[in-house]
Each structure stands twice: as C-alpha cells, then as structure tokens.
Image (cartoon, helix red, strand yellow):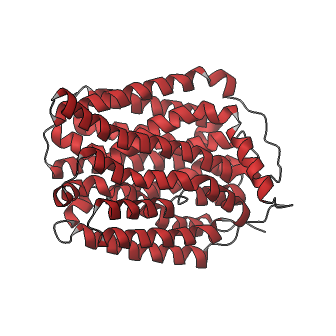
Amino acid sequence: MSAPSFLRLYLCFASAYLLSYVYRNVNAVISPELTASLGISASSLGLLTSAYFVAFAAMQIPAGMLLDRYGPRRVEPVLLCVAGCGALLFAASDSVVGLTIARALIGAGVSICLMAPLKAITAWYPAERHASLSGWMMVAGGAGALLSTAPLAAALSFVSWHGIFVALAATTFAAAAVIFLLVPDTPNLPNAAGWNAQWHGVRTVFGSRRLWWMAPVGSAVTGSFMAIQGLWSVPWLIEVNGYSRDVAADHLLLMGIAIVGGYLGIGVFATRLARVGISTLHLYAAGFGLSVMALALITLRAPWTYVLWAVYGLGVAVNVLGFTLLGQGFPRALAARANTAFNLLIFGGSFASQWGIGLVVDAARSRFGIDTSAALRLAFALVLAIDILAYGWFVMGWRRHASVAPAVEVSA
C-alpha cells in the first residue's frame, strides 16, 4: 500500500494538535479571571490546571497500545470527542471540583494529538524523514501556543472564558470528524499481537536503559517548560517583572513565535543537517542546553526579558526530536508504546512542576512570610536546579547511548 500525501495527513492531524496546545496553555491567560471568580489559592490553581497533565499522562500507556493495535484514525477521533465534552463541562462549571474534572477530561481527550501523527509517520514514511516530518507536525502545536497568548487575551475583551470554551468544544468535535473521514488506516502489522503480548511490549519499553537515559531530561526540562508556559509564566511576568497582563501575553506570543521558528527549522533542516554530520542527538542536546541557560537568566531576573523568554521557548523546540531518538532503539511495532511511555514521563514531570510551583509559592508565603514575587523566585530556582541535574545526567550518558544497533522488527 502506497503512502498517502503527507499534506493530507498533516492538515488533518495538525488541526487537533493545534487545539491541544490551546487547551494546554489557555489557563495561563485566563488565570486572573479564574482566581477572581473562584477566589482560589495558588496551589489550588496549580492543581486545577495540572489535572490536564495527570489525565494526559494516565492515558499514555493504554493509548499507545490502542494506537499500535488499531491505528490513529480509529483511536484519536474517539478521544477528541472526550475532550470536546470536557470543554463544554469547563464552560458550564463554577466550582473548583467541576473545573478540575473538566480539565482532566480535556487532558485525556487530547492525550494522543501528537502520538497519533507520530505513529502515522512511523508507519507510512522512511526513517530518514521522521525528524523533519515530526518537526512540521510540531509547527501546528506552536501555532496553537501562539493563539493561546495575545490573541486569546484580546478575545477576552469581547467574550467570556465560558464562551471561549464553548467555541473550543465545537472546533474539537469538527477535528474529530475530519480525522475519521479523511485519514486512511495505517498498514496492518503482520501477526498482530494480542493484549498479553502488547503488555510484554510495554514492559520491554520500560525496561530499556535508553528510555531512562532520556526520561530525566525530558520530564524535567520539557515538563517544567510546559508547566511554566501553561500557567506560571504570566504570574511570574506580572508579580516578579511588574508587567501588565497584556505585556505578559506579548512575552508569551514572542516565545510562541520562537517555538514555531524552531519547529520550522527542524522541519526544513533536520534531514539536511544529518547529512553533514549534525545529528538529531546534537540538536537535542544543544536545544535543551540553550533552554536551561535561558531559564537560569530568567530566574536571576536578567534584563531583556522578551529575548530571554523567546530563547527559552526556542531551545525547548527540540523536544520533538526526543521521540525520534528514543525510537531508534526500538522496532517499528513498538513505536507508539515507546513514544507514549516517554510522553507519560514528560507529562508526569509537567504535573509535578505545575502543582509543585504552586505548593512552594503557598508554603513560602505562609511559613516564611515572603511576598508572591519572592515565593515565585524560590520556586523557579528549585525548578532550575532540577533541570540542571537532569541535563547533566543526559550528558553523562552520551557515550553509552548515542549509538544504537538497528532495531529488529517484532510483532510484540
């Protein structure tokens, strides 16, 4: 069976992945409204928002098994309908409990918006194109990040956050229909495995040293970035830097533009750079090093904040290459389970960071009597320390894990 046009697959999957990024980051911009209307603490806001990450992470292993067995076309539309229902519930809720449940449904529903297209790319296209095609897919996510910054802040001048979530729900249902109707089924693997064999494949992935070499830097650096971008960036820019919400949203917009630029660069140049000796691994290490350095300068309250936040986002744009690097150590039959295992750990790190920052802020204010600005600086410093340790672990394992033997195809 010949591979379908990538443009066709891209437009279908990109619509859903764009929405997943809007859902991920929308609470950062509407956090003042949520805090004012509900009167909740920083830790409660962090827990409410991070329910997305908990549900997202919890879905990764079962979703990976479903993707490997049934393919993206049959699995993603069902989950997107769950996300649409979650968005409607979020719009209708006026309590922390209701909003938390709704946020969890959204997280579960969009949990494979990247994993599904990565599975399709692995199934349909040759390995040398995977990094570039994945980079193009991430451009859609970056576009969603852009929409959830200054444009969303501007929209709040005309419509309430309730109305925004109703519109998001309708768009999500439409994306589900497009994928189901226009995306072809991926080729069936020979001797498709039963559920016991599927679980054996999951155990194989989690027993891999390669996964645990990459997991700390992915869960710490990418996870904390998503937590900061999705919630704590705006409070930091307002409380620590003294900016208005509109200026804070402008910072996120510029950061989003930098992320899209990074994804475009990966999409256009990753394959070409590999031909001249600059591998996916080199790009991955350089990007994360750049991101950690930018977070250090942000935490130290260095000037040129627009530049620092843009560089912070630009560096993390290499996160998509982690799935390509991880996949080099596994057969194609395990592609979705390897990717979702890695994604589980990344979003576990996001949950820990997003809720943990709120816990540190509340504890610092209540126990040490410091203001919100100082409490946020303490929380960011702790995040930075963890990021540095995780990046050091990755660098230390470079020689052992940089080269891998070709994966043997299995049906597990």
Residue 248 drawn at (x, y percent): 21, 47
Q: Quadrant of residue 184?
A: bottom right
Q: In this rendering, is residue 395 above or below 330?
A: above
Q: Residue at x 13, y 39 (%)?
A: 242
- Seen as rendered, the residue at the extreme right is 191
Q: Nearer the viewer, residue 255 or 225?
A: 225
Q: Is residue 84 left or right of residue 94?
A: right
Q: Nearer the viewer, residue 349 or 387?
A: 349
Q: Is residue 327 left or right of residue 353?
A: right
* Quadrant in which the N terminus appears: bottom right
Residue 102 drawn at (x, y percent): 39, 64
Q: Is residue 22 left or right of residue 347?
A: left
Q: Nearer the viewer, residue 16 or 305?
A: 16
Q: Is residue 367 left or right of residue 258?
A: left
Residue 196 visible in the displayed image: yes
Q: In this rendering, is residue 372 above or below 95?
A: above
Residue 142 drawn at (x, y percent): 41, 54
Q: Residue at x 39, y 55 (%)?
A: 24
Residue 276 visible in the displayed image: no
Q: In this rendering, is residue 286 above or below 26?
A: above
Q: Residue at x 36, y 43 (%)?
A: 355
Q: Quadrant of residue 205?
A: top right
Q: In this rendering, is residue 388 above or below 356?
A: above
